[in-house]
Amino acid sequence: MRRQDPFAARLERLAGFAAVFEAPGFVAGEHVTPASAPGVWTMPYARYHPEVDRFVSIAYEDGWVRSDFAWGEWSQTPEAQSLRDDPVVLATATLDQLARLITVVVRQERFVEGSLMGAFEGGLVLGIVRRAGVLMEGADI
């Protein structure tokens, strides 16, 4: 009997989003400005595609969103910036680096609404799920 890789199922769920996020016409979400009455100012908000909401839920359920490091500080490091800004570097990310990136993009949304949309538009989230697929191929499933 082959030993199960503890990350295989988690990677498979994460990698499964690649087909959705790569689909022609896929849009992660939109910025919504609600109608307001005269003299009343209403805050705009981000409304996400249901698959983005599912991605965030799975990120939490599968432990990709971590609480064991200072994600805000780490997001400013050269390592994080390189992973975020260079698709070639992201394509070599480790499991730990993927978890850190996911933590940053998911947690940052709680403080800066719409930032997750930027991570989709810039290709970061797609790069993350693609890398999960590559790592999954090397796992003993």
Image: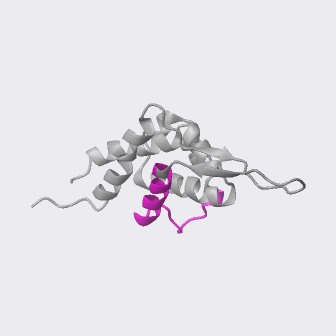
Q: Residue at x 42, y 35 (%)?
A: 23
Q: Give coordinates of residue 106: x percent, y percent.
A: 56, 56
Q: Residue at x 38, y 51 (%)?
A: 14
Q: Is residue 112 left or right of residue 117?
A: right
Query: Along the line of sight, which residue is nearer the eye, 96 or 125?
Result: 125
Say if residue 63 shows up in the picture. Answer: yes
Q: Is residue 11 above or below residue 86?
A: below
Q: Give coordinates of residue 111: x percent, y percent.
A: 68, 59
Q: Is residue 27 left or right of residue 38?
A: left
Q: Give coordinates of residue 93: x percent, y percent.
A: 44, 45
Which residue occupies the extreme left position in the image? 1
Quarter placement of the C terminus: bottom left
Q: Which residues are magenta?
A: 51-73
Quarter placement of the N terminus: bottom left
Q: Is residue 40 left or right of residue 67?
A: right
Residue 110 lies within the magenta run: no
Q: Residue at x 65, y 58 (%)?
A: 73
Residue 55 lies within the magenta run: yes
Q: Is residue 124 above or below residue 56?
A: above
